[in-house]
Image (cartoon, rainbow, N blue to C red):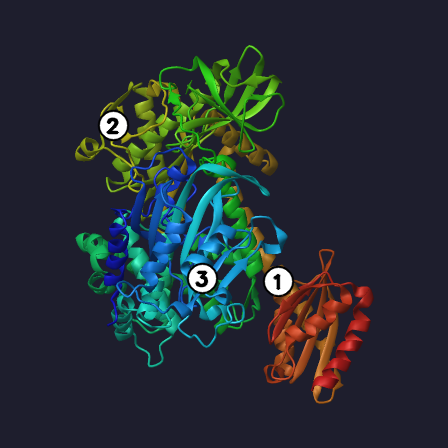
Amino acid sequence: MIKTTNEIRKMFLEFFSNKDHKILESSSLIPKNDNTLLFTNAGMNQFKNIFLGSEKAKYPRIVTTQKCLRTGGKHNDIKNVGNSNKHHTFFEMLGNFSFNDYFKKEAINYAWELLTSKKWFNLPKENFIITIYETDQETYKIWLNEIGINKNNLIKIGDNKKNKYCSDNFWQMGKDGPCGPCTEIYYNNNIKNTCFKKYKEDFIEIWNIVFIQFNKISHDNIKPLRKSYIDTGMGLERISAVLQKVNSNFKIDIFIELINHIISLANKEIINKKSIYIIADHIRSISFMIIENITPSNEGRGYTLRKLIRRSVLHGNKIGIKIIFLHRLIPVLIKTMGFVANEIKNKKNKIKKIIKEEEKKFLILLKKGKKLLNQHLNDEQKIISGKKIFYLYDTFGIPIELISDICNTKQIKLDINGFRKYMEKQKTLARNNNNFDKKYNTCILPINSISKFKGFEKYQLTSKIIFIIVNNNLLKQINKNDKTIIILQETCFFPESSGQKGDTGYIKTSTGLFKVKNTIKYGLSIAHIGELKQGSIKINDSADIVLNTERRNKIEINHTATHLLNAALKKILGSKIEQKGSWINDEYLRLDFTYKKNIKIYLIHQIENLVNYHVRKNHKIKTCNMKFEDACKKNISKLENKTYKSIVRVLSINKFSNELCGGTHTKNTGNIGLFKIISCVSNSANTKRIEAVTGQIALDKIHEQNIEIQRINLILGINNNQTKSKIQNLIYDKINLEKQVNSYKIKEIDITYKKIIKNFIKIKDIKFIFYILDNIENKLIFKLIDKIKNKIKPVIIVIINKKNEKNFIIISISNCLTKKIQAKDIIKIILKKTDGKGGGGKNIAIGGNINLNYIEKAIYDLKLWIKKNI
């Protein structure tokens, strides 16, 4: 009898419960105390601190079924969904764990018993292939001698490209830290294809058993851990496909009804299977993300949610779904997912509402986007630049899939490489602005100590050095200026958190001076990152902790101003304003918040006036601690997607602002001096970002603006009251001049056209044109090419444009020739001979950096090639 997915899940938990494992519920999809992960992506995430040694296990044996999301970073399966039968963005990971209790022998025996015993999964033993790490003889002997696996079905996997410990069968938590060999269990229903290396795609990896027994010090140096751990993971959807004897995860029982419902909504006879799978996969991820109080936005987890919703809607359009449909899938999801869907059931109205609203907004955006995109395209255009693609994507939120679809129908090529460069620039900027030091964002070493933070009350104190870390190694002493982490018993340095930049300053001992360049959280401790400037420093030294008070004061002023800004936004723009994030340093402050409409300049002035009013009132800043549940009852402002502790810190500014905040603040609002908004931009369709400055920097900004206006007036030779009218006249004159220039260029193109059509040659029945132009705009060249193609048929056109010290090449051919000859083939021949770069498609190809010294030989060879291929 075929087992349902719900039965398989229960059987797994029951099996390990019988083996004295404690059943724990799935942890949140939002990892707690781990800034390195956007989402929980494996069963071991919730036990990470145990593996690192900074937390003790409550139970020696644990079993879980963990909700996982893989939508970014190292584990990103978004692109695999639909193209693969076994990948999902959301999935359940079945796992059993041992914390210094049982090890290899028991873990392997448990897995084999569950998989092959008639009482449990009852799978035929001969259908399994087992892989192990090449040098792990202990695991090899257990499988061969104790389990009795066929030697031919036991495969050793070595290091990739001879890089030590870099192997599919050697698991690592990171570049450093806990690691160990693993054994992977593969299954194949088609026992005819028994050769694993030749038919690897026929084998499904269903279970990975990791033996965490080493600590990685460097790329080729590992040392044994004092404690050993077992970490296993088996995808529920994959084992269900095996037990239900289907060749795709999307054919198991929990997907079948969902897929049939999606098909019933479609309006096409031929249904794209890929689109169906994407929608069925994404609706699960979307629903479980909203349960975690994630809402669609343009950053972080909210951006991932928005991306999955929009991707689902686009694929709904592709299969002909004409209605707002995603929310209609929720009842089917609840019905098919079993007891794990209880959370969805409890919040189904909220989930449906958020999905429906976002889909509505996106459909409006799609309509506007298509119109806007068509405005930026024209029939003469042959390529859309990476810069323009990024502009349409980043500014207006037009999906790349939509841009690609519309451009394909118009035979317009996309500069995807250029777009990726602009995307990478944006990612780099985001990484630079992110609120943690990337190199030290995770606690690699097992530091068990808790650093006491005294910085709310003190700017200076004496403490004790308890750890020194260089290159993830614990040292007793430092004598040189390597980048170092120092951990103190107590500190007044604030670590980056609550959107606030970490502190800087100095740590002084009797023998040395250490400059602190940043302060971050490091597990349960506080890490002071910097370098030794003088002498030497060692463990247990008594140290004077000297904070950069001037910098801290500026940060505190900006942080308090951020709270005033948040309160002012709610007063001026409405109470439904929701803060989505902030960033505060000593130079400026930034606040992201939800707001649908454009914020006009008079509203910006009202917001500034209200903040400055409360600055002048010189309110005293008050803080207190209370239970989180009590703070929620009092409707004190908080970040919706943030995980808070049971006891929280509340910061109050008169009756104007009440927020949860763990950051540092100035004592009175009057210390802010002056508040000035310097920018207000849209982060997405419904999210805005305000940047502002305070104090002397704000005053300097006002002075800069006045000086700039004076400079402009001086250049124009006018008085202050004439600025507006003079600039309007200059714009009018510029428009008229551009019209005149364009008319001259069009006449020049007409003259060139007449020259070109007299200078073609014939290669059999085809007209061939080669011409060199001097510094002509590309858009005019495309007009010229279209004019030639309308006059002469069939034709192959090769034009060189000498422009900006670069020689561009544009190739265009008639549609009727593309079955035999294509532009992309022609450009390859020329580029090979002239050291140029470029590419293209059937009708059009573009390149650059052509060496004109070799162009004649290239054209000669091209003519011979055309003659041969016609």
Q: Nearer the viewer, mark 1 or mark 3?
A: 3
Picture layout, residue 42 above or below residue 362 = above
Amino acid marked by disc 1: Asn
Horizontally, is 635 left or right of 749 in the view? left
N-terminal-most mark, 3 or 2? 3
Q: Kindly identify the amino acid type of the residue bearing the numbered disc 3.
A: Lys
Q: Is residue 493 left or right of residue 608?
A: right
Residue type, mark 2 in image? Phe
Is residue 371 visible in the rendered structure shown here?
Answer: no
Are circles 1 and 3 on residues that touch, CB within 8 Å? no
Front residue (pair 831, 244): 244
Split into 4 quadrants, where in the image is the C terminus? bottom right
Tell me the residue that label 3 is attached to. Answer: 79
* Residue contact at pointers 3 and 2, CB within 8 angstroms: no
**Residue 46 position within the rendered picture, expressed as x and y whole percent measured from the top left:** 34, 43
Quadrant (top left/top right/bottom left/bottom right) for the N terminus: bottom left
Q: Camera-side residue: 478 or 375?
A: 478
Q: Marks 1 and 3, how far apart in space?
A: 45 Å
* Disc 3 packing (10 Å; few <14; some 14–19; many ≥20): few
**Where residue 73 sits: x, y (%)?**
46, 50
Q: Earlier in the sequence, mark 1 or mark 2?
A: 2
- At mark 3, the secondary structure is loop
Q: Which residue is mark 2?
A: 656
SS state under label 1: helix
- Tell which residue pokes out farthest to the front in this image: 145
Q: Residue at x 31, y 65 (%)?
A: 240
Provide residue 106's location: percent of width, then percent of height: 37, 50
Q: Residue furthest top?
A: 510
Of circles 3 and 2, which is in front?
Answer: 3
Residue at the spot of label 1: 742
